Amino acid sequence: MRKVYVALSGLLLLAIVAQFYFAAVGAFDKPQEDGSFALHSMTGTMVIPVLSLLAIVAAAVARAPGRLIGLTALPLGLLVVQVLIIVLGRALNDSTGNTTPASLAILGLHAVNGMAMMGTAGLVLRRARALMTAPDGAAAAGEAPLRDSAARTP
């Protein structure tokens, strides 16, 4: 099950990287239409949440330490923040629906939060890979495997 956890963590990171690509495609589409951000929206509302939930379940079944399970859940929490950023940013638009300086300041956080999601997903993948190679006893105790036995201290 640890290999499944690593695979799902990798797919989650890949989906988040694809989100940035899809956002750029939408931003550079001329003329911009309702469908310009369709791939970005679909990936953010369907693919990433499903992969996040599956990775959380896989982490639990693989008997990952509680902190790692929590870290695995963090991208899903940050995805909720993504939606809240959009809702709040749009609420600050003017009466005609055009952005205001305040709405742009909030909406700009969408990309920053996306980078936090990507960094978290990368960390989850790295730790999932370490869990996969850890002896069962070390993983159950929540210990991080050391690559160099000389680095251990008594």
Image (spheres, rainbow, N blue to C red):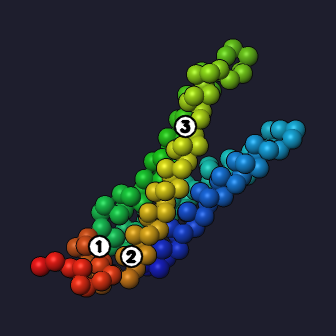
- Quarter holding the N terminus is bottom left
101 to 28, vertically: above or below: above
Residue 41 vs residue 24, the one in the foreground:
24
- Choose top left, top right, bottom left or bottom right for residue 29: top right
Report which residue position mark 3 lands on. 109
Q: Is residue 14 left or right of residue 33?
A: left
With 69 as the anchor, is 104 left or right in this view? right
> Measured from the top left, where is residue 125 in percent x and y?
47, 68
SS at circle 1? loop
Q: CA distance from mark 3 to mark 2?
A: 31 Å
- Is residue 123 left or right of 136 when viewed as pictured? right
**Residue located farthest toward the top when viewing the structure as drawn:** 95
Residue 38 in sight: no
Q: Residue at x 37, y 68 (%)?
A: 60
Q: Is residue 88 above or below residue 129?
A: above
- The first of marks 3 and 1 along the sequence is 3
Question: Could you tell whether 24 is left or right of 154 in the image?
Answer: right
Q: Is residue 46 visible?
A: yes
Against 21, is 10 above or below?
A: below
Label 1 crowd bin: few (<14), some (14–19), many (20+), radius 10 Å: few
Residue 130 image label: 2
At x 49%, y 60%, the residue is: 121
Q: How many marks?
A: 3
Name of the residue lying farthest toward the front: 150
